[in-house]
Image (cartoon, helix red, strand yellow):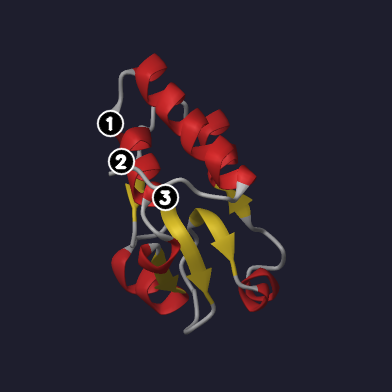
Amino acid sequence: MTLEHKNERLKELISSLKKQSLEQKTGLWKRIALELERPTRQHRVVNLSKIEHNVKDNDVIIVPGKVLSGGQLTKKVTIYAYQYSKSVADKLNGNVMDIEDAMKKYPNGKNLKIIG
């Protein structure tokens, strides 16, 4: 069953993720689109402490949901997510990037990790 979201930004993102998946023949973007298609209450929510625990230095990760500010991030990682809490933007010095940016920078999805 597909859920019809009212959020226009989310609809466009899901559509472009599916299109990117077909063009690049990679399942990563389709997987992220399927995660974002879920009901909002089932979207992934990840604290910085979980990211810190599960990544190595210089990793590039995607969170198909929201990043929260619980914990500290000491490792040098690049985070792309659908949403960020306001306090995360402060902790990361405003260096927050959307999934759309990841699609442009890594069109084939290589070297990306999904956390969530």
Relative height, residue 95 to residue 36 (above, below) = below
Q: 77 or 18, which is in the foreground?
A: 18
Q: Find out whether the residues at labels 2 and 1 contact each other: C-beta distance under 8 Å.
A: yes
Q: Which of the two marks, 3 or 2, is nearer to us in this view?
A: 3
Q: Amino acid at mark 1?
A: Gly
Among the 4 quarters of the image, the one containing residue 57: bottom left
Q: Quadrant of the N terminus?
A: top left
Q: Nearer the viewer, residue 35 or 57?
A: 35
Residue indicated by mark 2: 31
Q: Secondary structure at mark 2?
A: helix
For the residue pair 20 and 36, the one nearer the viewer reads as 36
Instruction: Relative to 85, say whether 62 is above or below.
Output: above
Q: CA–CA distance between discs 1 and 3?
A: 14 Å
- Which quadrant of the rendered structure holds the C terminus? bottom left
Rendered location of residue 93, percent (x, y): 71, 68
Q: Which of 43 and 58 lies nearest the eye of the viewer?
A: 43
Q: Residue 39 at x, y = what percent?
A: 39, 59
Three-letter residue code for mark 3: Leu
- Residue 106 location, x and y as percent? 47, 31
Q: Which residue is mark 3?
A: 36
Q: Residues within 10 Å of mark 2 (few under 14, many from 20)?
A: some
> Label 2 to label 1, Cα distance in Å?
6 Å
Q: Would residue 114 be seen by someone viewing this image from the given angle? A: yes
At x 48%, y 83%, the residue is 70
Q: Position of residue 112 (x, y in %)?
A: 37, 42
